[in-house]
Amino acid sequence: MKRTSATALLVLLAVGAAGAALVQVGLTAAGRPIVSPPITLPLALAAIGAIVVILALPIRRMTQAPPRDTVRAKRSSGPVDPFYATRVVMLAKASALSGALLTGAGAGMLGHLLTRSVAPGADSIGMAVAATVGAAILLVCGLVAEFMCRIPPEDDEDGDDGKPLRAIQ
């Protein structure tokens, strides 16, 4: 699996910002109330991010170099379950991508609120900032968990073609 690219994250960030801003402008033009995220949204996003990182911790422990302490070696013995690792890395990637989209959406809502001619309430701006921060936490936690699930390079003496490497003379 390829790592999440910065380009994909930036595109999702821009799509989220443009989409949320357009929805807010459309609602305002129609005379309807704008979308204001509830306080539970940033809390839930941050909690999901923390759960993703916690799920990636066992994989990180198993893929690191063996510890020098024999007591710790007994606790972390055993191979990595490939199905668990696949599920966690896919969850981490989904968290990073959805975090980027939601961060953009929060920024788009915040941008719309700050550019209105009528001053919005402080609670609306606070909720938009909180939603943006919660989504950014989800994005960062997804990227960290994805990094934790990578396999370290193997230290073998063979080249790419399977033949042993020769010393340079």
Image: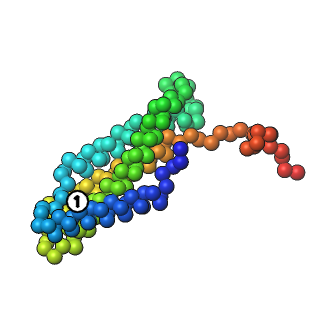
Does residue 62 appear in this view? Answer: yes
Q: Nearer the viewer, residue 90 or 40?
A: 90
The local secondary structure at tag 1 comes to helix
Residue 169 coordinates in the image, percent (x, y): 88, 51
- Where's residue 118, x and y in %? 13, 73
Which residue shows up at 55% across the image and 37% down it? 64
Residue 73: percent from the left, percent from the top? 54, 27
* Quadrant of residue 161 within the rendered picture: top right
Q: How many marks?
A: 1
The amino acid on which the numbered mark 1 sits, given as a three-letter code, is Ala
Q: Please tell me whether residue 159 is drawn above or below residue 82 in the rendered image.
A: below
Kindly give the residue lying farthest to the bottom in the view shown. Answer: 117
Residue at point 29%, 43% (across, down): 47
Rendered view: 24 above or below 148? below
Q: Is residue 101 left or right of residue 32?
A: right
As displayed, is residue 54 above or below residue 37? above
Residue visible at 47% across and 60% down in the picture: 7
What residue did someone put label 1 on? Answer: 128
Q: Residue furthest front?
A: 30
Give the colouring mode of the picture.
Answer: rainbow
Looking at this view, is 124 or 1 the one in front?
Answer: 1
Q: Is residue 95 above or below residue 85?
A: below
In the picture, measured across the screen, residue 162 lies left or right of residue 121, that is right
Q: Left or right? Give the position of 5 relative to 99.
A: right
Can residue 107 be seen in this snapshot?
A: no
Residue 128 at what x, y percent from top left?
Answer: 22, 59
Residue 166 in which image quadrant: top right
Mark 1, Cα crowd under 10 Å, few <14 / some 14-19 / many 20+, is many
Q: Residue at x 65, y 39 (%)?
A: 154
Please tell me which residue lies in front, 142 or 24.
Answer: 24
